[in-house]
Image: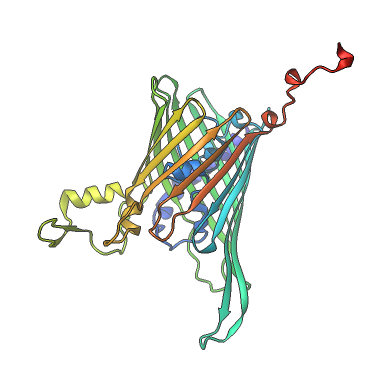
Amino acid sequence: MRIVKLLRNILILFCLLFPSWSKAQTGGKTDFDFLTLIGSARTAALGSNWLPIKDGDINVALMNPSLISKDIHKSFGLNYINGAGGINYGYAVYSHTFEKAGSFTGAFQFINYGTMREANETGEIHGDFSANELALNIGWGRVLTPRWSIGANVKLAYSSMYPDYNAAGIGVDVAGSYYIPDENMTLSLVANNIGYVFAPYSSGKDGPFPFSLSFGMSQKLKHIPFRYIIVYNHIEKWNLRGNSKPTMTVDPILGDTTMMKGEKKFADNLMRHLTFGAELTIAKVVNLRASYNYGKRQELMTETKKGMVGFSWGVGLSFKRFSIDYARTVSHLAASPNYFTFSANIDRLIAKRTSRMPRSADED
């Protein structure tokens, strides 16, 4: 009951302070942006850094704590992402359910920017240095009814960009999910990275945590092994085009450009909030996934060669004891990260298959 009261107080605080958080800007004006990165292969393939899917996937529960439950008891996930320019990041997560206290997760997130060369304004080399960021995450979730569940994360984040340029902060995620069993549909509302920087960078110029408020839904069809996902990100901020150049339309025949106005401008901004994903399961073992992120495509593509920027795809193999997932996202023509995930349940992984062991001669 103490945990329920604590979560209630967090929710009240969230409602009181939401107007100030909603002023937070996207697009690199926040600290600890690595907390918003997509962490697992499944979420990457489905195009979002969090998912409204209730199916016992511990990697989904990391960013949506309302899905933390006894269904992922003793499960763990290992995630590694090979980014562009030698950047590597990922996380490890484990879940355990206690009879009275409820269900918890513990996670360690990291990102390493590699080794960089230090030089002064004249080009004189002083040596090399490395940069990295870390976060420790403790999550809690509770199923209130067969339909309603809630959850929260508390995370300690640390950033080291240079020997004398460090920062630390504390953040909170709060989430709620509504499950409709007859339709196999999940609806989730998630507030990520409500935070405070208590040890700012030495420069004194610090931004807020990368707060976002998002809503999503998923549904697995009854007679077809197919699931669709729709996520609406950044409810707190309507205009996601920021200070970028005005949206233009190009005449396909004359090549003339005009500013996008009215309904087209509204539709363009709306689509920047949305991510669409789909997952097809074959023979209960193979999972094929794909997604489209219009906002990412508009921000990162080039006019001369658009390619598949904004699209993601992946494949997953689910076995009785463990699962392996891979995904690739086309974030830019020059940068397409690869995502790898290994997940398992400890009890299933180390279970003794005594019934399959051959009998010894002494037993005959």
For the C terminus, give its image quadrant.
Answer: top right
Q: How many numbered dots are placed on residues in this image?
A: 0
Quadrant housing residue 289:
top left
Residue 313 position, x and y percent, is 42, 43
For the N terminus, give its image quadrant.
Answer: top right
Query: Is residue 262 shown above or below 324?
Result: below
Q: In the image, is 275 to the left or to the right of 155?
A: left
Residue occupying image coordinates x 60% and y 38%: 343
Residue 95 position, x and y percent, is 64, 37
Residue 188 position, x and y percent, is 44, 36
Residue 195 position, x and y percent, is 52, 54
Q: Residue furthest top?
A: 364
Q: Residue furthest bottom?
A: 122
Q: Nearer the viewer, residue 241 or 8?
A: 241
Q: Residue furthest left?
A: 254
Q: Nearer the viewer, residue 250 or 355?
A: 355
Quadrant housing residue 350:
top right
Residue occupying image coordinates x 30% and y 58%: 241
Q: Residue furthest right?
A: 362
